[in-house]
Image (cartoon, rainbow, N blue to C red):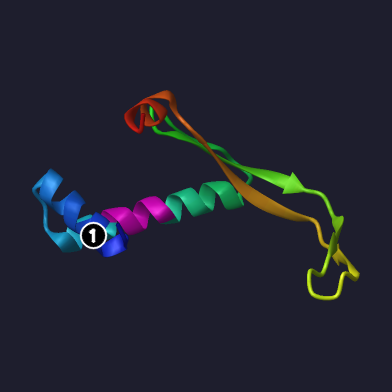
Amino acid sequence: MNKSDLIEAMAADAGISKVAAGKALDSMMSNVKGTLKGGGKLSLVGFGSFSVTARAARDGRNPQTGATIKIPARNVVKFKAGSELKDSVN
């Protein structure tokens, strides 16, 4: 499923237009990004939690040459699935 498929499904489920569903999805994604960018955590009960964690700098290897390279520190997004989501895929 891609974004346009999701918008179509949301519109059908909610009985709204695709334009309204697209705006709702864009708003949701914008708010998730804003919350995570500010260092916050987003929890959707039953679905899961999004959070940001710091990944330390580390050494890595170039697979072609075997040379050691420095991988810089960065923030990464983590997602932990909620119990309802886990149970729905089993």
Residue farthest along the right direction in this orientation: 68
Above or below for 67 versus 51: below
Amino acid at dot 1:
Asp
Q: Identify which residue, 23 or 45, lies in the foreground.
A: 45
Q: Identify which residue, 12 or 31, lies in the foreground.
A: 12
For residue 25: magenta? yes
Could you classify mark 1 by the number of other residues whose Cα lies within 10 Å: few (under 14), some (14-19), or many (20 or more)? few
Residue 45 visible in this rendered orientation of the protein:
no
What residue lies at 47% left-to-right and 49% top-to-bottom? 32
Above or below for 65 versus 74: below
Q: Position of residue 22 (x, y in %)?
A: 25, 60
- 44 relative to 54 in the view: left or right: left
Q: Position of residue 77 (x, y in %)?
A: 60, 48
Q: How many marks?
A: 1
> Tag 1, which secondary structure?
helix
- 69 relative to 53 in the view: left or right: right
Q: Position of residue 59 (x, y in %)?
A: 88, 58
Residue 22 visible in this rendered orientation of the protein:
yes
Write down the region rendered in magenta: 24-29
Residue farthest along the bottom direction in this orientation: 65
